[in-house]
Image (tube, grey):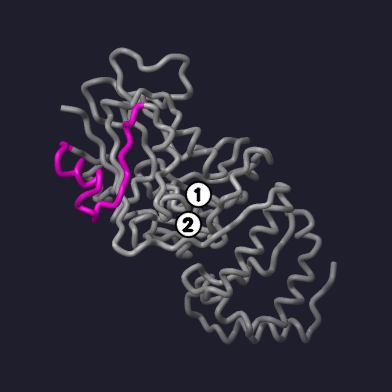
Amino acid sequence: MPRMTNHDDQNLQEGLNSLGNEKMSRRDFLRRGSILATGMGALMAAMSPLRQLQGAFDPEEFVQKHYKEMTPEEMDKVLRRIERKVAERFDVKATVRDIKPMDGVEYVYALNLSKCNGSRKCVHACVNENNQSRSPEIQYITVLKMPQGTMDMDKGEILYDPPKVPEEGYYYMPVQCQQCANPPCVKVCPVHATWQEPDGITVIDYDWCIGCRYCEAACPYWARKFNFAEPRIPKERINPDMSYLSNRPRSKGVMEKCTYCLHRTREGRYPACLEACPTGARIFGNVLDPNSQISFVLRNKRTFVLKEEVGTIPRFFYYFDE
């Protein structure tokens, strides 16, 4: 194994000493990385055999700035790098974009529980649209089979592709990311890899996620999913229309979640789960537009949110027909 020279070791140690005893985030480390450049170069060379065991190590990805700090030019370079990686990994030509939120838009979802028939077509449409792993399969939407007469989701049974729905005596409650206005998942992330966008969508920068799973533990809706294994997606199932903050392929050891299909919705389209719903149970739109269908539902239906008592303030509402 290559060894660090005394000179390299001295440069690295001087760089570390210059940081003092203050607590340092990955962002701070990268900002000050120029101090450590010489010593780190030797350290990376020494780690070469370990990299061969653990898979390819991309130094460009490691020193990549936080999403919010990248210039348009830097972001474009990152997007092209991701496209190359997709081509290498899946032999698919993809287009990866950074789609920004629109001004004057706050997305809200509503679901008519009287209409949902438990078909789980929304689940599979979501998986297909968002390039989720098929083996093991990761699903953002959990459909609960609920006994009639209760809205306590803890009494529900998770539904897995039943042979026949609906069943008498039950109704069905799909649960996914609630895009909370007060998201506990954001507060607990130690590296600021997740945050809430101006249009209300909580996102994850997969390149900054360290896989600590604090956000998964903090979410009361089971909405965060962790890649315990390397995600596997057949080439023919890849959706090549990708966005940096939504459906680009993920890697082992990072979190992911529903983003209201922001690569679609920020361009005026509906989420894939809504388009796949066979009963028209799903309503989605801009709550800041008083003429939108979602605004009509919130004004005229008796809506409720899940686990209101925990103070997350969901942007996902449920209601029954009167």
Residue kind at label 1, given as amino acid type: Glu
Query: In the image, is 316 to the left or to the right of 320?
Result: right
Rendered position, 21 above or below 57: below
Tell which of 265 and 259 is nearer to you.
265
**Splitting the image into 4 quarters, where does residue 76 fall?**
bottom right
Report how far apart the C-alphas of labels 2 and 1 lie in the structure.
7 Å
CB-based contact (under 8 Å), mark 2 and mark 1: yes
What residue is shown at x 49% (from left), y 44% (from top)? 225
What residue is shown at x 41% (from left), y 51% (from top)? 265
**On the rendered image, what quadrant is the C terminus found in?**
top left
- Residue 80 is one of the magenta-drawn residues: no
The numbered disc on residue 204 is 2
Residue kind at label 2, given as amino acid type: Ile
What residue is shown at x 14% (from left), y 39% (from top)? 300
Crowding at mark 1 (Cα within 10 Å: few <14, some 14-19, many 20+):
many
- Residue 289 is one of the magenta-drawn residues: yes
Stretch in magenta: 279-302
Tell which of 172 and 266 is nearer to you.
266
Crowding at mark 2 (Cα within 10 Å: few <14, some 14-19, many 20+):
many
x then y, percent, for residue 208: 54, 62
x then y, percent, for residue 110: 28, 40
Q: Does dot 2 land on a helix, a strand or a loop? A: strand
Q: Does dot 1 land on a helix, a strand or a loop? A: strand
x then y, percent, for residue 42: 77, 76
The numbered disc on residue 256 is 1
x then y, percent, for residue 302: 16, 36
Query: In the image, is 44 to the left or to the right of 64?
Result: right
Query: In the image, is 10 to the left or to the right of 165?
Result: right
**On the rendered image, what quadrant is the N terminus found in?**
bottom right
Q: Earlier in the sequence, mark 2 or mark 1?
A: 2
Rendered position, 136 above or below 57: above
